[in-house]
Image (spheres, rainbow, N blue to C red):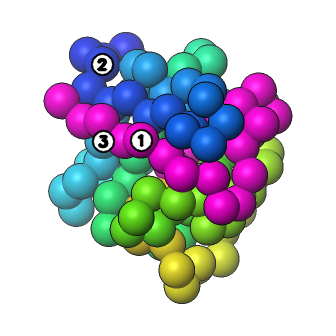
């Protein structure tokens, strides 16, 4: 993703960095577009989708790891390596979704219940 870094996410519980060069989707169109057209996410890249508790990977070129996050910035669920052309089921207790490269969950040792620090610029 070639863009100006506007999003940083740390897993406070595990003391690991999840995203250090990401972007935020906080409007209808930016949420609609999501990662469509993106062919590669480097470690540290990612997308925070606000006001969302479900996603789809239609028209995507790669699998992704997905964090479902509560209003309090706690991980409520995780999808590992969600393949293209899939629909993630809605998570009732999530209000944000974070899309990251496959392997991020493993690299960061993230688990349900971990607290995140989300910084947007």
Circle 1 is placed at which residue position?
117
**42, 121: nearer the viewer:** 121
**25, 10: nearer the viewer:** 10
Circle 3 is placed at which residue position?
24
Alpha carbon of mark 2 to alpha carbon of mark 3: how far?
Answer: 10 Å
Which of disc 3 and disc 2 is earlier in sequence? 2
Secondary element under disc 1, as helix, strand or loop, is strand
- Image position, residue 64 (x, y; %): 68, 42
For the C terminus, which image quadrant? top left
- Image position, residue 66 (x, y; %): 63, 51
Question: Is the residue 107 above or below the residue 95 in the image?
Answer: above
Residue at (54, 39) in percent of width and height: 12
| Residue at the bottom extreme of this rendering | 92
For the N terminus, which image quadrant? top left
Circle 2 is placed at which residue position?
5
Question: Residue 101 lies in magenta, yes or no?
Answer: yes
Circle 3 packing at 10 Å, graded few (<14), some (14-19), many (20+), is: many
Secondary element under disc 3, as helix, strand or loop, is strand
């Amino acid at each position: 993703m070639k863009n100006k870094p506007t999003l940083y996410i740390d897993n406070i519980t595990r003391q690991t960095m999840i995203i250090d060069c990401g972007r935020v989707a906080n409007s209808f169109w930016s949420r609609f577009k999501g990662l469509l057209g993106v062919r590669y996410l480097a470690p540290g890249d990612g997308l925070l989708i606000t006001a969302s508790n479900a996603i789809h990977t239609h028209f995507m070129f790669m699998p992704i790891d997905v964090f479902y996050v509560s209003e309090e910035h706690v991980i409520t669920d995780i999808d590992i390596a969600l393949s293209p052309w899939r629909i993630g089921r809605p998570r009732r207790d999530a209000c944000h979704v974070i899309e990251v490269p496959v392997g991020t969950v493993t690299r960061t040792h993230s688990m349900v219940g971990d607290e995140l620090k989300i910084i947007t610029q």
